Image (spheres, rainbow, N blue to C red):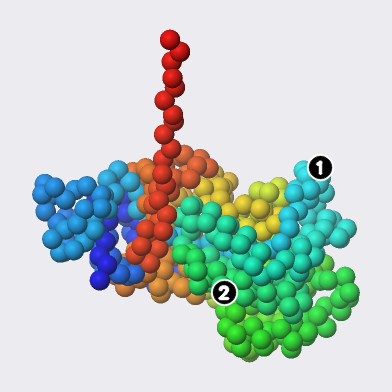
Amino acid sequence: MKKLYIRRASELVTCRGSAPKKGAEMADIGLIKNGGVLIHDDRIFAVGTTEELDLLAGFEEGSGQADACTETASGYTVLDASGKTVLPGFVDSHTHFIFGGYRAEEFSWRLKGDTYMSIMERGGGINATVGPTRDASIQELVSVGRERMNRMLEFGVTTVEGKSGYGMDRNTELKQLRAMKELDASHPVDIVTTFLGPHSVLPQYKGKEREFIDMLLQDVMPVVKEEGLAEFADIFCEKGVFGIEDSEYYLTRAKEMGFKLKVHADEMNSLGGAELAARTGAYSADHLLKASDEGIRQMAKAGVISTLLPATAFCLKEPFAPARKMIDSGCAVALASDLNPGSCFTNSIPLLIALGCIYMNMSIEEVITALTINGAAALGRADCIGSLEKGKKADVVILKYPSIHFMPYHTGINLVETVIKNGDVAYQKEWERLPELKREN
């Protein structure tokens, strides 16, 4: 049995629980001063103060065991976290990280005043990524996907959601999902997959959206289900894309097929996407920049996770989703990157933290909850990840500084020193030394 003991953390965040934290509960992160974690193989065995866990681990202070990576008499490898913050691994619960090609020029167009929807209408946007993704081989998608996942790991992400949706045909949708399945089997970061075939309307289906949805339901999704390629089904419910009626039709049938549900809802217009998510029993409604007060109330009542994507609003120069109103209304809020080739080509966790605290009026405690246990709940994983407590996966992040308050304070900077995934050190930051300058005599 592998045994690891993380001890003497200045602050240890537990976020205990197996369900999403709602409303005022989001501020309770279960902080332990001078905390520690005992890990057996890939699971957490115990969490508590260093004093409590020293007894369990057979650790004797002053016995020469205080250095990192020494071993106790009972077989624990010791990782000294003195002066550092220890948290659950981050969960990025909304991304589109498998795609071909880039759309850098669109970013410049938006800077000049073009809107996201106007770019879509002139042939840009999601449809502009379809061709390069269709042309890419599965090996090419796996290769670029692995590189992106490496960057996620460096930011402390231990579980990520990945969506299809850049093929919108049978072969490419399956290719994207199969690439993610291969990556999930070979990369430390776990992937939860979502089928997003109705991500946009291809030109040949404009005005025939229901026909397109039926094609996906009949020709693609049975194969996805048979091969176990996706756990969730999602749709872009938006004016000019898929309306409420077509979205509800799709979600209802996807649920009948055994898919769990997510909804791209109320991003550009207040269509009633939040209400739709509540009505159909979706795990999460995502974006929600224009969610109505009634939609927020219904999400809170139905237990739908409000997954907010502040980096997308930031890149689009749109008003941020009303996180404070949602939390005060009793919603469970998650934060995610929305990494994609168009509206948000970033997976920066420090950026999410800064935007959440500075512009969305969230406390750092609420932001941490949104990136851990609530992100896990948005993926149906709150029973096994998202918190540090006995029996859960040993997914742990160690930050350089001694307090959670450094996370927004050291603004936009990655503070992650070490990432432990399933009980193994999966990433460790090697702080660079500047070369000594030679003096000329």
331 or 219, which lies in front? 219
For badge 2, the amino acid type reads: Lys
Name the residue rendered at 58%, 57% in the picture. Answer: 148
Question: Residue 165's quadrant in the figure?
Answer: bottom right
Residue 213, position as x, y percentages in the image: 77, 81
In the rendered image, which residue does mark 2 sit on?
A: 181
Name the residue rendered at 72%, 66% in the picture. Answer: 136
Question: Residue 145's quadrant in the figure?
Answer: bottom right
| Number of the front mark, 1 or 2 | 2
In the rendered image, which residue does mark 1 sit on?
A: 112
**Mark earlier in primary sequence (1, 2):** 1
Residue 130, position as x, y percentages in the image: 77, 66
Is the residue 207 above or below the residue 322 in the image?
A: below
146 or 106, which lies in front? 146
For badge 1, the amino acid type reads: Lys
Distance of label 1 from label 2 (alpha carbons): 39 Å
Left or right of 21, for residue 315: right
